[in-house]
Amino acid sequence: MSSETAVNDANGVAQAGAAASGSQPVGAARRRGPFREGERVQLTDERGRMNTITLERGGAFHTHRGFLNHDEIIGKVDGSVVVNNVGQQYQTLRPLLSDFVLSMPRGAAVVYPKDAGQIVTMADIFPGARVVEAGVGSGALSISLLRAVGDNGYLHSFERREEFADIARGNVETIFGGPHPAWQISLGDFQEEVVKAEEPGSVDRVVLDMLAPWECLDAVATVLAPGGVWINYVATVTQLSRTAEAIRADGRFTEPDAWESMVRGWHLEGLAVRPDHRMVAHTGFLLVTRRLADGVTGISVKRRPSKTEFNEEDVNAWTPGAVGERAVSDKKLRRAARDAIAGTNVVDTPEVTN
């Protein structure tokens, strides 16, 4: 099978899935209309305190200042203001993607919205693109990638742990209202499975969130089309350095480019306009490179000589324990998977005019 045939077949499957789901994009219905049973709703009180609840018939949201019946919210339009039993007002809104990511069930650390946005833009993830990713975690980045590729695109995610795959699947189906026609998830090591699943040169973009992306050089070079983008999300300087040097030594990719982003909010109150005391600082590094044509050797950028060899101490610096990662218990993973799957149970109700 040729690369072009593989692309056409995959797009045909995606288009058929989109057609079966209706004329509007998958997940769009959950962003419109009245609040439904099973939906998540963001409540903001008069002091700006925010809580996210899941609506249940007969349920109630309790605080030290009274209770609010869920039935008072179900059927209301997005952006309504409701009042609890003692007169406390709450502003009701559907959580944005950034809100959902930070509050959704998780078994592993999520890719923060600031980094997901950078990945989608800097990796040039476009509607209809064929994308593969590894290190699914809890599915936060997968959701952003699926929104970018659209119903007629293609995202193949690879995850080593079945528990993480279950959590990711539940979170993806929660936000889209069911399985996404462009998505499939496979268990196993990326470098072994991707070359079995994807035709050589058939992938437009590769997104890796893992401890040792340099181990995937050959696999990425095999499936990535000439000119395709490979972007890596890594946590430590040691990982960043080793990945960059491995890419340079390989010769099949362009000179890697790396950066990190930091987000600082601002306090806005009358003339008291100043930076917030807190900020979202380092979460990870992003490193991007592009696949060169077969038989072409990359141009080496002239630079001052520096140490490029890694000893045993350097290698051990990026192990999970060394970078401060805590082992996730099986009990926590099972609980997160149950919560993620439970979030898919939204009851569709006729639109109510208030």
Image: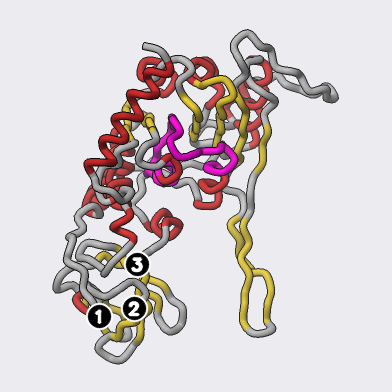
Residue 167 at x, y percent in the picture: 30, 43
For the point 83% across and 22% down, which residue is it? 302
Query: What colour scheme governs how the chains and residues are painted in the rendered image of this protein?
Result: secondary structure
Residue beneath label 1, please? Answer: 354
Element marked by disc 3? strand
The quarter holding residue 73 reads: bottom left
Q: Which mark is residue 80?
A: 2
Residue beneath label 3, please? Answer: 52
The mark nearer the N terminus, 3 or 1, is: 3
Query: Given the image, on which type of amino acid does mark 3 rest?
Result: Thr
Residue 115 at x, y percent in the picture: 55, 47
Q: Check disc 1: other Cα within 10 Å, few if <14, some if 14-19, many if 20+.
A: few
Q: In the rendered structure, are the residues bearing label 1 and label 2 in contact, judged by CB atoms less than 8 Å apart?
A: yes
Q: Quadrant of the N terminus?
A: top left
Residue 189 at x, y percent in the picture: 39, 23
The magenta segment is: 119-146
As measured in the structure, the alpha-carbon distance from the residue carrying label 3 to the one carrying label 2 is 15 Å
Query: Given the image, on which type of amino acid does mark 1 rest?
Result: Asn
For the point 59% across and 40% down, which residue is it? 122
> Is 257 situated above or below 198?
below
Instruction: Find the residue positioned furthest to the top.
Output: 295
Q: Is residue 336 visible?
A: no
Dot in front, 1 or 2: 1
Q: Is 330 on the left or on the right of 255, as rendered?
A: left
